Image (spheres, rainbow, N blue to C red):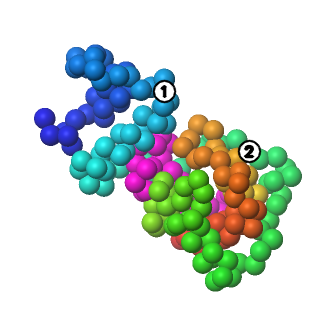
Amino acid sequence: MPFEKLPMEYLYNVINHGGPAVGKSPNMPYWGLTMGQQGVADVIAYLKVTFKGIPDVTAVGDGAQAGVCVQPRKTAKASEDFISKTNPFPFSSHSIQAGKELFLRTAQPIACVMCHGEQGDGKGLMGAALVPPPRNFTCGMMMREIPDGQLFWIIKNGSSGTGMMAFPGLPDEQVWQLIHYIRSLAK
């Protein structure tokens, strides 16, 4: 059977539970305990991209889709100390450009584009198998509802229950630049 025809459940089971789980060789070990659920999802995304081209993003989890405008989340709410923060840097072409460079290339440990996509629409290569899918920053309706302080807190601390990792080593000024860039994507 061609790779692109393999059902997602099959790929999940063979990677997470090993070859014997799908009636294949015991030489294929199970990886679920070693790399966790997110690691399994990342491997599936990599395989889909490598052997098929850019994956077709379909509904996942509770029906959320990458690229869909409003994406419900059960994100932990930042403390009032963070929620009340506003971006201390002026919204300017310089701050947006600096944020764009971080988003597309230089943010560490990984550039945001890998999950959130070139357009910030949640369609990045590594984000294809994330459940829930990465945020679609182009959704103005949703982005207006998220305070700057909450975005800052999520970037610094990650978001439990999603693929959003923490960026605790990113200097505060760079986090604020990223927020300006992310806000510039909303339509």
Q: Is residue 148 left or right of residue 127?
A: right
Question: Magenta region: which residues?
Answer: 121-147
In-front residue for pair 160/44: 44
Direction bottom: furthest residue: 93
Between marks 1 and 2, how big is the CA–CA gap? 30 Å
In the rendered image, the quadrant that contains the N terminus is top left
What amino acid is found at the position of numbered circle 2 in the picture? Lys
Contact between marks 1 and 2 (CB within 8 A): the answer is: no
Residue 64 picture location, percent across and down: 46, 45
Which quadrant of the view contains residue 75?
top right
Q: Return the residue at label 2.
A: 77
Residue 166 in percent (x, y) is at 65, 47
Q: Is residue 55 above or below residue 147?
A: above
Q: Nearer the viewer, residue 61 or 175?
A: 175
The numbered dot on residue 34 is 1
Q: Position of residue 182 (x, y in %)?
A: 60, 66
**Rendered view: 50 above or below 100:** above
Give above or below for 181 relative to 155: below
Residue 122 placement (x, y as % from top left): 47, 56
Packing grade of label 1 (10 A; few <14, some 14-19, many >=20) is few
Residue type at numbered disc 1: Thr
Query: Is residue 131 magenta-colored?
Result: yes
Q: Residue at x 28, y 28 (%)?
A: 10
Q: Residue at (51%, 67%) from the top-left corner?
A: 104
